[in-house]
Image (cartoon, rainbow, N blue to C red):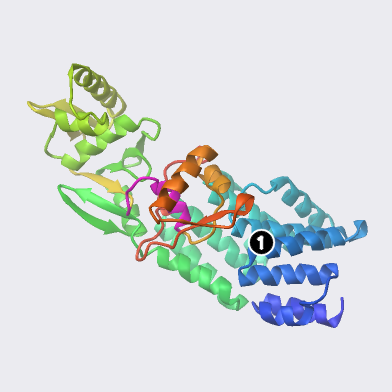
Amino acid sequence: MDSLITAAARALAIGDPLGALKRVGLREDPPALALRGTAMAQLGDLARARVLLRKAARGYGLREAVFRARCIIAEAEVALASRDLLWQPKALSAARETLEQHGDRLNAAFARYIDIRRLLLIGRLLQAEQALSALDSQALPPPLRAAHELIRAGIAVRRVQASVARRALICAERAARQAAIPALIAEVDAASRALVTPVARLLAQGTQRALALAQVEALFASAALIIDACRFSVRQAGATVGLARRPVLFTLARMLGEAWPADVPREALMARAFRAKRADDSHRARLRVEIGRLRSVLRQLARVVATERGFALLPHRAHKVVVLSPPVEERHAAVLALLADGEPWSSSALALALAESARTVQRALESLAAAGKVQALGRGRARRWMTPPLPGLAPALLLPAVLPGDLG
Protein backbone atom coordinates (compact mmCIF):
# COMPACT_ATOMS: atom_id res chain seq x y z
CA MET A 1 0.00 0.00 0.00
CA ASP A 2 1.58 3.31 -1.07
CA SER A 3 1.88 6.41 1.06
CA LEU A 4 -1.03 8.28 -0.58
CA ILE A 5 -3.40 5.37 0.02
CA THR A 6 -2.25 5.16 3.64
CA ALA A 7 -2.70 8.90 4.17
CA ALA A 8 -6.16 8.84 2.56
CA ALA A 9 -7.23 5.93 4.75
CA ARG A 10 -6.08 7.78 7.87
CA ALA A 11 -7.99 10.88 6.78
CA LEU A 12 -11.19 8.85 6.39
CA ALA A 13 -10.67 7.19 9.77
CA ILE A 14 -10.81 10.59 11.49
CA GLY A 15 -13.75 11.85 9.39
CA ASP A 16 -11.85 13.99 6.85
CA PRO A 17 -13.24 12.94 3.43
CA LEU A 18 -11.94 16.03 1.64
CA GLY A 19 -8.43 15.28 2.85
CA ALA A 20 -8.77 11.76 1.47
CA LEU A 21 -10.02 12.99 -1.91
CA LYS A 22 -7.10 15.39 -2.22
CA ARG A 23 -4.79 12.38 -2.16
CA VAL A 24 -6.65 9.83 -4.33
CA GLY A 25 -9.34 11.83 -6.13
CA LEU A 26 -7.86 11.26 -9.60
CA ARG A 27 -6.75 7.66 -9.23
CA GLU A 28 -8.63 4.69 -10.74
CA ASP A 29 -6.90 1.71 -9.10
CA PRO A 30 -9.13 -0.45 -6.85
CA PRO A 31 -7.74 0.78 -3.46
CA ALA A 32 -8.18 4.41 -4.52
CA LEU A 33 -11.68 3.72 -5.86
CA ALA A 34 -12.65 2.15 -2.54
CA LEU A 35 -11.35 5.14 -0.60
CA ARG A 36 -13.03 7.57 -2.99
CA GLY A 37 -16.32 5.71 -2.52
CA THR A 38 -16.01 5.89 1.24
CA ALA A 39 -15.20 9.61 1.03
CA MET A 40 -18.24 10.29 -1.18
CA ALA A 41 -20.42 8.41 1.31
CA GLN A 42 -19.13 10.61 4.14
CA LEU A 43 -19.91 13.67 2.02
CA GLY A 44 -23.46 12.46 1.43
CA ASP A 45 -23.27 11.50 -2.26
CA LEU A 46 -24.49 7.96 -1.64
CA ALA A 47 -25.32 7.09 -5.24
CA ARG A 48 -21.81 7.97 -6.44
CA ALA A 49 -20.33 6.16 -3.45
CA ARG A 50 -22.06 2.91 -4.40
CA VAL A 51 -20.84 3.16 -7.99
CA LEU A 52 -17.25 3.65 -6.88
CA LEU A 53 -17.35 0.86 -4.31
CA ARG A 54 -18.88 -1.57 -6.78
CA LYS A 55 -16.22 -0.65 -9.35
CA ALA A 56 -13.50 -1.17 -6.75
CA ALA A 57 -14.86 -4.62 -5.84
CA ARG A 58 -14.81 -5.66 -9.50
CA GLY A 59 -11.25 -4.40 -9.85
CA TYR A 60 -9.85 -6.76 -7.22
CA GLY A 61 -8.70 -10.17 -8.47
CA LEU A 62 -9.55 -13.61 -7.14
CA ARG A 63 -6.49 -13.56 -4.91
CA GLU A 64 -7.68 -10.32 -3.29
CA ALA A 65 -10.87 -11.72 -1.75
CA VAL A 66 -10.42 -9.79 1.50
CA PHE A 67 -10.32 -6.41 -0.22
CA ARG A 68 -13.29 -7.33 -2.41
CA ALA A 69 -15.25 -8.40 0.68
CA ARG A 70 -14.48 -5.10 2.38
CA CYS A 71 -15.84 -3.22 -0.64
CA ILE A 72 -19.04 -5.29 -0.54
CA ILE A 73 -19.50 -4.52 3.14
CA ALA A 74 -18.87 -0.80 2.55
CA GLU A 75 -21.47 -0.80 -0.23
CA ALA A 76 -23.94 -2.55 2.08
CA GLU A 77 -23.46 0.21 4.65
CA VAL A 78 -24.08 2.87 1.99
CA ALA A 79 -27.18 0.97 0.83
CA LEU A 80 -28.48 0.97 4.40
CA ALA A 81 -27.80 4.70 4.75
CA SER A 82 -29.70 5.34 1.51
CA ARG A 83 -32.54 3.16 2.82
CA ASP A 84 -32.15 0.55 0.10
CA LEU A 85 -33.39 -2.38 2.16
CA LEU A 86 -33.59 -4.81 -0.74
CA TRP A 87 -29.85 -5.35 -1.18
CA GLN A 88 -28.85 -8.97 -0.81
CA PRO A 89 -28.14 -9.99 2.82
CA LYS A 90 -26.56 -13.17 1.42
CA ALA A 91 -23.81 -11.15 -0.27
CA LEU A 92 -23.09 -9.40 3.02
CA SER A 93 -23.04 -12.71 4.86
CA ALA A 94 -20.64 -14.22 2.30
CA ALA A 95 -18.32 -11.21 2.58
CA ARG A 96 -18.37 -11.47 6.37
CA GLU A 97 -17.48 -15.16 6.25
CA THR A 98 -14.59 -14.39 3.90
CA LEU A 99 -13.21 -11.85 6.35
CA GLU A 100 -13.60 -14.22 9.29
CA GLN A 101 -11.74 -16.96 7.39
CA HIS A 102 -8.85 -14.55 6.74
CA GLY A 103 -8.71 -13.29 10.34
CA ASP A 104 -10.19 -9.81 9.73
CA ARG A 105 -12.50 -9.97 12.73
CA LEU A 106 -13.05 -6.22 13.07
CA ASN A 107 -14.52 -5.75 9.60
CA ALA A 108 -16.46 -9.00 10.02
CA ALA A 109 -18.00 -7.57 13.19
CA PHE A 110 -18.79 -4.37 11.31
CA ALA A 111 -20.69 -6.46 8.74
CA ARG A 112 -22.73 -8.03 11.53
CA TYR A 113 -23.67 -4.60 12.85
CA ILE A 114 -24.85 -3.55 9.38
CA ASP A 115 -27.14 -6.57 9.22
CA ILE A 116 -28.47 -5.92 12.74
CA ARG A 117 -29.20 -2.28 11.90
CA ARG A 118 -31.21 -3.45 8.90
CA LEU A 119 -33.22 -5.83 11.10
CA LEU A 120 -33.90 -3.00 13.53
CA LEU A 121 -34.96 -0.67 10.73
CA ILE A 122 -37.58 -3.09 9.41
CA GLY A 123 -38.92 -3.80 12.90
CA ARG A 124 -37.54 -7.31 13.49
CA LEU A 125 -36.62 -6.60 17.08
CA LEU A 126 -36.28 -10.13 18.36
CA GLN A 127 -33.86 -11.14 15.60
CA ALA A 128 -31.86 -7.94 16.08
CA GLU A 129 -31.72 -8.50 19.84
CA GLN A 130 -30.52 -12.10 19.47
CA ALA A 131 -27.84 -11.15 16.94
CA LEU A 132 -26.61 -8.27 19.11
CA SER A 133 -26.38 -10.43 22.24
CA ALA A 134 -24.01 -12.78 20.39
CA LEU A 135 -21.44 -9.98 19.95
CA ASP A 136 -18.89 -8.94 22.59
CA SER A 137 -18.40 -5.21 22.18
CA GLN A 138 -15.70 -4.90 24.84
CA ALA A 139 -13.04 -6.32 22.52
CA LEU A 140 -13.91 -3.88 19.72
CA PRO A 141 -12.43 -0.43 18.95
CA PRO A 142 -14.38 2.69 20.02
CA PRO A 143 -16.27 3.25 16.72
CA LEU A 144 -17.74 -0.26 16.79
CA ARG A 145 -18.47 -0.03 20.51
CA ALA A 146 -20.44 3.14 19.79
CA ALA A 147 -22.33 1.35 17.00
CA HIS A 148 -23.11 -1.53 19.37
CA GLU A 149 -24.53 0.78 22.02
CA LEU A 150 -26.52 2.79 19.46
CA ILE A 151 -28.21 -0.39 18.29
CA ARG A 152 -28.85 -1.44 21.89
CA ALA A 153 -30.44 1.96 22.52
CA GLY A 154 -32.55 1.63 19.36
CA ILE A 155 -33.91 -1.73 20.47
CA ALA A 156 -34.65 -0.35 23.95
CA VAL A 157 -36.48 2.62 22.45
CA ARG A 158 -38.68 0.31 20.39
CA ARG A 159 -39.35 -1.71 23.53
CA VAL A 160 -40.24 1.52 25.41
CA GLN A 161 -37.36 1.00 27.86
CA ALA A 162 -36.13 4.55 28.35
CA SER A 163 -33.78 3.76 31.24
CA VAL A 164 -32.02 1.01 29.25
CA ALA A 165 -31.76 3.31 26.22
CA ARG A 166 -30.30 6.11 28.35
CA ARG A 167 -27.57 3.87 29.77
CA ALA A 168 -26.72 2.59 26.30
CA LEU A 169 -26.46 6.14 24.94
CA ILE A 170 -24.14 7.15 27.78
CA CYS A 171 -21.84 4.29 26.79
CA ALA A 172 -22.21 5.22 23.11
CA GLU A 173 -21.25 8.83 23.83
CA ARG A 174 -18.16 7.74 25.75
CA ALA A 175 -17.06 5.48 22.88
CA ALA A 176 -17.81 8.13 20.26
CA ARG A 177 -15.70 10.69 22.13
CA GLN A 178 -12.85 8.20 22.27
CA ALA A 179 -13.19 7.59 18.53
CA ALA A 180 -13.16 11.37 17.93
CA ILE A 181 -15.32 11.03 14.78
CA PRO A 182 -17.59 14.10 14.45
CA ALA A 183 -20.33 12.29 12.47
CA LEU A 184 -20.52 9.53 15.08
CA ILE A 185 -20.67 12.04 17.93
CA ALA A 186 -23.48 13.89 16.12
CA GLU A 187 -25.42 10.63 15.65
CA VAL A 188 -25.21 9.84 19.36
CA ASP A 189 -26.26 13.40 20.26
CA ALA A 190 -29.30 13.14 17.98
CA ALA A 191 -30.32 9.83 19.55
CA SER A 192 -29.95 11.35 23.02
CA ARG A 193 -32.17 14.30 22.13
CA ALA A 194 -34.87 11.91 20.94
CA LEU A 195 -35.21 10.55 24.47
CA VAL A 196 -36.40 13.90 25.83
CA THR A 197 -38.62 14.99 22.93
CA PRO A 198 -42.33 14.05 22.73
CA VAL A 199 -43.07 10.63 21.27
CA ALA A 200 -46.77 10.38 22.14
CA ARG A 201 -49.81 12.22 23.49
CA LEU A 202 -51.81 11.27 26.56
CA LEU A 203 -55.57 11.78 26.23
CA ALA A 204 -57.63 11.55 29.40
CA GLN A 205 -60.99 13.09 30.37
CA GLY A 206 -60.94 15.71 27.65
CA THR A 207 -57.35 16.84 28.21
CA GLN A 208 -54.12 15.99 26.44
CA ARG A 209 -50.41 16.39 27.07
CA ALA A 210 -47.19 15.37 25.35
CA LEU A 211 -45.10 12.53 26.77
CA ALA A 212 -41.42 11.71 26.38
CA LEU A 213 -40.30 8.09 26.22
CA ALA A 214 -39.52 7.89 29.95
CA GLN A 215 -43.03 9.10 30.76
CA VAL A 216 -44.51 6.47 28.45
CA GLU A 217 -42.44 3.81 30.21
CA ALA A 218 -43.75 5.02 33.58
CA LEU A 219 -47.30 4.96 32.23
CA PHE A 220 -46.91 1.35 31.08
CA ALA A 221 -45.69 0.42 34.57
CA SER A 222 -48.71 2.06 36.23
CA ALA A 223 -52.05 0.44 37.02
CA ALA A 224 -53.95 2.50 34.42
CA LEU A 225 -55.92 0.85 31.63
CA ILE A 226 -54.25 2.14 28.45
CA ILE A 227 -55.80 2.29 25.01
CA ASP A 228 -52.58 2.36 23.00
CA ALA A 229 -53.14 3.98 19.59
CA CYS A 230 -49.40 3.74 18.82
CA ARG A 231 -49.41 -0.07 18.88
CA PHE A 232 -53.16 -0.61 18.44
CA SER A 233 -53.63 -2.51 21.67
CA VAL A 234 -55.26 -2.33 25.08
CA ARG A 235 -52.93 -2.94 28.03
CA GLN A 236 -52.76 -2.90 31.78
CA ALA A 237 -50.02 -4.02 34.19
CA GLY A 238 -48.23 -6.22 31.67
CA ALA A 239 -51.36 -7.76 30.13
CA THR A 240 -51.87 -6.76 26.49
CA VAL A 241 -54.71 -7.34 24.04
CA GLY A 242 -53.58 -6.72 20.46
CA LEU A 243 -56.13 -5.19 18.09
CA ALA A 244 -53.86 -4.24 15.18
CA ARG A 245 -55.76 -6.57 12.86
CA ARG A 246 -59.20 -5.58 14.19
CA PRO A 247 -59.51 -1.85 13.41
CA VAL A 248 -63.24 -1.62 14.14
CA LEU A 249 -62.82 -3.05 17.63
CA PHE A 250 -59.90 -0.75 18.31
CA THR A 251 -61.88 2.29 17.15
CA LEU A 252 -64.70 1.38 19.51
CA ALA A 253 -62.26 0.80 22.39
CA ARG A 254 -60.56 4.12 21.74
CA MET A 255 -63.83 6.05 21.70
CA LEU A 256 -64.89 4.45 24.97
CA GLY A 257 -61.46 5.21 26.46
CA GLU A 258 -61.55 8.85 25.38
CA ALA A 259 -65.00 9.32 26.92
CA TRP A 260 -64.30 7.46 30.18
CA PRO A 261 -65.85 7.64 32.76
CA ALA A 262 -68.77 8.86 30.63
CA ASP A 263 -70.52 6.78 28.00
CA VAL A 264 -70.57 7.22 24.21
CA PRO A 265 -73.84 7.52 22.26
CA ARG A 266 -74.62 4.71 19.83
CA GLU A 267 -74.90 7.17 16.94
CA ALA A 268 -71.38 8.47 17.57
CA LEU A 269 -69.96 4.95 17.73
CA MET A 270 -71.60 3.97 14.44
CA ALA A 271 -70.57 7.17 12.68
CA ARG A 272 -66.90 6.78 13.54
CA ALA A 273 -66.46 3.00 13.54
CA PHE A 274 -68.57 2.28 10.45
CA ARG A 275 -68.28 5.71 8.78
CA ALA A 276 -72.06 5.78 8.59
CA LYS A 277 -73.52 9.22 7.88
CA ARG A 278 -77.03 7.95 8.59
CA ALA A 279 -77.42 4.95 10.85
CA ASP A 280 -80.07 2.36 10.00
CA ASP A 281 -81.13 -0.95 11.49
CA SER A 282 -78.24 -2.81 9.81
CA HIS A 283 -75.71 -0.48 11.47
CA ARG A 284 -77.38 -0.94 14.84
CA ALA A 285 -77.29 -4.71 14.45
CA ARG A 286 -73.63 -4.58 13.44
CA LEU A 287 -72.83 -2.38 16.44
CA ARG A 288 -74.35 -4.97 18.78
CA VAL A 289 -72.21 -7.67 17.15
CA GLU A 290 -68.98 -5.64 17.36
CA ILE A 291 -69.64 -4.61 20.96
CA GLY A 292 -70.11 -8.29 21.78
CA ARG A 293 -66.75 -9.06 20.18
CA LEU A 294 -65.13 -6.21 22.08
CA ARG A 295 -66.54 -7.52 25.35
CA SER A 296 -65.05 -10.91 24.54
CA VAL A 297 -61.51 -9.70 23.78
CA LEU A 298 -61.43 -7.28 26.76
CA ARG A 299 -63.04 -9.61 29.29
CA GLN A 300 -59.83 -9.94 31.34
CA LEU A 301 -59.27 -6.18 31.55
CA ALA A 302 -62.64 -4.41 31.48
CA ARG A 303 -66.37 -4.64 30.91
CA VAL A 304 -68.32 -2.87 28.18
CA VAL A 305 -71.72 -2.02 29.63
CA ALA A 306 -74.81 -0.71 27.93
CA THR A 307 -76.27 2.61 29.07
CA GLU A 308 -79.50 4.38 28.22
CA ARG A 309 -77.90 6.22 25.28
CA GLY A 310 -74.91 4.04 24.38
CA PHE A 311 -72.01 2.14 25.95
CA ALA A 312 -69.35 2.76 28.60
CA LEU A 313 -66.05 1.15 29.61
CA LEU A 314 -65.66 -0.17 33.15
CA PRO A 315 -62.14 -1.47 34.02
CA HIS A 316 -61.95 -4.38 36.46
CA ARG A 317 -59.00 -3.18 38.56
CA ALA A 318 -57.76 0.11 37.12
CA HIS A 319 -58.91 3.39 38.61
CA LYS A 320 -57.96 5.31 35.48
CA VAL A 321 -58.44 4.91 31.72
CA VAL A 322 -56.23 6.83 29.29
CA VAL A 323 -55.58 6.87 25.56
CA LEU A 324 -52.02 6.98 24.26
CA SER A 325 -51.84 8.39 20.73
CA PRO A 326 -49.01 9.24 18.30
CA PRO A 327 -47.68 12.83 18.48
CA VAL A 328 -49.16 13.51 15.04
CA GLU A 329 -52.21 11.73 13.68
CA GLU A 330 -53.17 11.97 10.05
CA ARG A 331 -53.61 9.83 6.98
CA HIS A 332 -50.46 7.93 5.96
CA ALA A 333 -48.91 8.69 9.35
CA ALA A 334 -46.83 5.48 9.24
CA VAL A 335 -45.14 6.57 6.01
CA LEU A 336 -44.42 10.01 7.44
CA ALA A 337 -43.03 8.41 10.61
CA LEU A 338 -40.41 6.51 8.63
CA LEU A 339 -39.56 9.51 6.47
CA ALA A 340 -39.20 11.66 9.59
CA ASP A 341 -35.64 10.41 10.09
CA GLY A 342 -34.58 12.78 7.30
CA GLU A 343 -33.06 10.01 5.16
CA PRO A 344 -34.02 9.29 1.52
CA TRP A 345 -36.23 6.20 1.25
CA SER A 346 -37.23 4.22 -1.82
CA SER A 347 -40.86 3.18 -2.11
CA SER A 348 -39.80 -0.50 -2.07
CA ALA A 349 -37.91 0.02 1.21
CA LEU A 350 -40.93 1.74 2.75
CA ALA A 351 -43.13 -1.16 1.66
CA LEU A 352 -40.75 -3.65 3.27
CA ALA A 353 -40.53 -1.71 6.54
CA LEU A 354 -44.31 -1.24 6.74
CA ALA A 355 -45.21 -4.76 5.52
CA GLU A 356 -47.45 -3.18 2.88
CA SER A 357 -47.71 -3.72 -0.86
CA ALA A 358 -45.53 -1.53 -3.07
CA ARG A 359 -48.60 -0.09 -4.80
CA THR A 360 -50.21 0.89 -1.48
CA VAL A 361 -47.06 2.77 -0.46
CA GLN A 362 -46.77 4.43 -3.88
CA ARG A 363 -50.33 5.73 -3.62
CA ALA A 364 -49.60 7.07 -0.15
CA LEU A 365 -46.46 8.84 -1.39
CA GLU A 366 -48.31 10.35 -4.34
CA SER A 367 -51.00 11.66 -1.99
CA LEU A 368 -48.42 13.11 0.42
CA ALA A 369 -46.46 14.66 -2.45
CA ALA A 370 -49.61 16.32 -3.79
CA ALA A 371 -50.13 17.81 -0.32
CA GLY A 372 -46.54 19.08 -0.25
CA LYS A 373 -45.54 16.89 2.71
CA VAL A 374 -42.90 14.80 0.91
CA GLN A 375 -40.70 15.32 -2.10
CA ALA A 376 -39.13 12.96 -4.62
CA LEU A 377 -35.48 12.95 -5.66
CA GLY A 378 -34.32 11.23 -8.84
CA ARG A 379 -36.25 9.17 -11.35
CA GLY A 380 -37.13 5.57 -12.00
CA ARG A 381 -35.47 3.01 -9.76
CA ALA A 382 -33.20 5.72 -8.35
CA ARG A 383 -36.13 7.75 -7.01
CA ARG A 384 -36.04 8.44 -3.29
CA TRP A 385 -38.55 10.16 -1.02
CA MET A 386 -37.76 12.58 1.78
CA THR A 387 -39.41 14.88 4.27
CA PRO A 388 -37.80 17.09 6.92
CA PRO A 389 -38.12 15.90 10.54
CA LEU A 390 -40.99 17.41 12.51
CA PRO A 391 -39.56 20.20 14.69
CA GLY A 392 -39.78 19.49 18.40
CA LEU A 393 -41.05 15.94 17.95
CA ALA A 394 -39.26 12.62 17.95
CA PRO A 395 -40.28 10.39 15.03
CA ALA A 396 -43.42 8.36 15.67
CA LEU A 397 -41.29 5.37 14.79
CA LEU A 398 -40.20 5.40 18.42
CA LEU A 399 -43.60 3.92 19.18
CA PRO A 400 -44.40 1.78 16.14
CA ALA A 401 -47.35 -0.46 15.50
CA VAL A 402 -46.43 -4.11 15.90
CA LEU A 403 -44.89 -5.32 12.64
CA PRO A 404 -45.22 -8.89 11.39
CA GLY A 405 -41.49 -9.44 11.80
CA ASP A 406 -41.52 -8.38 15.45
CA LEU A 407 -42.00 -11.67 17.23
CA GLY A 408 -40.77 -10.33 20.56
Q: Where is residue 349 in the image (x, y as percent from the top left)?
A: 57, 48
Is 224 situated above or below 387? Answer: above
Q: Which residue is at the front of the view, 162 or 309?
A: 309
Q: Residue 232, located in which quarter of the rendered image?
A: top left
Amino acid type at circle 1 is Ala
Q: Residue at x 19, y 48 (%)?
A: 204
Q: Position of residue 223 (x, y in %)?
A: 25, 45
Magenta segment: does it hold 366?
no
One can see residue 77 in this view: yes
Q: Where is residue 301 in the image (x, y as percent from the top left)?
A: 27, 33
Whether residue 315 sits left or right of residue 141 in the image: it is left
Considering the image in quadrants, where does the N terminus appear?
Answer: bottom right
Is 74 situated above or below 29? Answer: above
Instruction: Please report the bounds of the magenta region as a residue range.
Output: 327-340
Pointer 1 residue? 47
Q: Residue 77, located in which quarter of the rendered image?
A: bottom right
Whether residue 96 sits left or right of residue 124 in the image: it is right
One can see residue 109 in this view: no
Whether residue 112 sits left or right of residue 57 in the image: it is left
Q: Residues within 10 Å of mark 1 (few under 14, many from 20)?
A: some
Q: Which residue is drawn at 54% across and 40% down?
A: 358
Q: Which residue is drawn at 47% across and 52% down?
A: 338
Q: Where is residue 294 in the image (x, y as percent from the top left)?
A: 27, 27
